[in-house]
Amino acid sequence: MTRHISGHRQLIYSLGAVTTAFAILMALQVHPVPAQEVTFAKDVAPILYESCVECHRPNSFAPMSLLTYENARRYASRIRSRVESRSMPPWHVDRTVGIQAYENDYSLTDGEIETIVRWVDDGAPMGDKADIPPLPDLPEGGAWQLENSFGRPPDLIVRSTPYDVIENGQDQWWGPTVPFAGLDEGRWIKAYEFKPSWPLGLRVVHHGHATLRAGGRNIGIAHYGVGKRYETFPDDIGMLFPAGEADVTWSLHYFPVGVGAPQDVVEVGLWFYPEGEKPALETRGEVLMRVDRMGGMPRGGDILIPPHGQQVLQGAHVLDQPTLINSFRPHMHMRGKEMSIEAIYPDGQREVLGKVSDYKHIWQISYQFALDQKPLLPKGTVLLFTSVFDNSAANPLNPDPEQWVVFGRRGVDDMSHMWVGITELEQEEFERLTAERRAKLVSQQGQGGSEKNR
C-alpha cells in the first residue's frame, strides 16, 4: 500500500532531513578527518624510482640525480613544477584526441602527480626511512638496456668510427660508412638498441640513424633520438638482415652544450630471432614520411616562417598496401610546436591516430601504439600529416623570434617529417588480423569491456 504524506508533514519531514544533514556537516567542520601524510619514503620514492631515475641518476644526461631523499628535497619545487605541467616525464601526446594506449607510455597518472604536489606543498617530509623501497635494479652506465629483457647481450654489434665532438654548442654531423664481414646466412632482427658512449656520448648525441647495405638492399636497422634508444618488434614481426658482405652508413647529429666528447663511438646492438625461425610478417621499421614537400623544388622549399609568426604544413602519403602502423615519431626543430598523423580511409572517413601537441626538439620520442591499438589500415588509405611551427617569443625553445626561418639541418633552421613504424601486409594477412581483432572486441564486449574497433 502506498503511503500519502500531506504537504505540511512533507515540509516538516524535509526540514528535519535538512537540519540533520546540516548538523552532520557542522560536525565534520568542527572535527575534520586528518588527511594521511604524504612522505618521500612511502609515497614519492616509489614514483621516482619507477618513472624518473632511469635518467635522473649519476653520470646520465639528466641534470640531477633523484635516487636520494636529500637530492629530491633539494629540487622539490622544480620537481613539482615539472610534473604538474606534465613536462616531466616527457610525454607530449595530446590527451584529448587520437589513440591513447601506448606500450611505452611513461607519463605519470593524475594520482601520482597529485601525490608529488601534495608532498612538496606539505614541506617535502621524509617519513619513516624503513618505508623506502629498495633502489631499482638499473643497468650500469654503458650497459645495453635490452640485455636484461633478452637475457643475453646483442647477437651482433656494429660500431661507428671515432669522431671528436667539439665543446662549442654548435650542430655537428658525422656520417662514416663502415664495412664489416656480414653474415653467412640471413637472420631476422627482433630488436635493436642504439647506444651512444657513456657518459659523454649520451650527453651530446641528439639523434642518429644506422643504414645497412647488404644483399643489394638498404635497410634502416636502427634509429635514435633523445628519449628513443631502442625498439622491440611485436611477436612474429621482424626485419630481415640479409646474408653477404655488408656495410653500415651512419648519420649522427651531435648537439653539445658545453660538453665535448673526444673520439666518440656509437654502437648499435641487434637481437635476432633464433636461427631458422622466420617471423610471419616483415617490418620496414621506421620510415621517413615528409611533411615538407619537394615537388620539383629543393626539399623543404616551402618552409618559410616569418619573425614572430607561425606556419602550418601538410603532407599526404597514400598506402599502396594494407598496413599495420606500429609507432610514430615527429621530427621538427626548435620552432616545432605540434604534429599529428591522421588516416583518411578509402570510404572518406577520417580518424586522428595520434597528435603531439607540445613538441619539444630536445626530445625525439617514438610513440609506440599498444598491441591491440596499432592501426590496421586498408590499401588506399591516405596518411595526412600536419605540422605547426611557432616562431614567436611564446615558444620557450625559440632562440630568436626576430629571424626568418627556412629549411636546414641545423637546430636553428627547421625540418618537417615524421618517422612512422610501418609493417606492410598482404590482403589475406590484413583480413586475418582484422577478423582476429573484431573477434577479440566482441569477446571483450560480451564480458562488459569496450574497445574501439579499428
Image: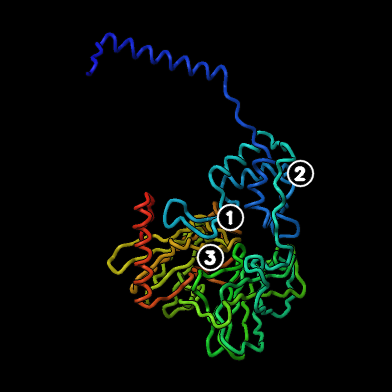
Q: Which residue is mark 1?
A: 90
Discs 3, 1 touching: Cβ within 8 Å: no
Residue with the mark numbered 3: 332
- Label 2 packing within 10 angstroms: few (<14), some (14-19), many (20+): few
Q: Earlier in the sequence, mark 2 or mark 3?
A: 2
- Where does residue 383 sit, x and y in percent of width and height? 39, 68
Q: Which of these two is toward me, 316 or 210?
A: 210
Residue 74 horizontal side relative to residue 227, left or right? right
Res 190 → quadrant: bottom right
Between the residue at mark 1 and the residue at mark 2, the CA separation in whole angstroms equals: 23 Å
| Residue farthest along the front direction in this orientation | 1
Indicate whether 89 appears above or below 254.
above
Residue at the (43%, 57%) spot, across then down: 99
Residue type at mark 3 is Met
Residue shown at 42% from the left, 54% from the top = 97
Which numbered dot is residue 70? 2
Tell me residue 128's x, y (percent): 73, 37
Determine whether the residue tagged by mark 2 lies in a helix, strand or loop: helix
Tell me the kind of residue under disc 1: Pro
Q: Which numbered mark, 2 or 3, is in the foreground of this view?
A: 2
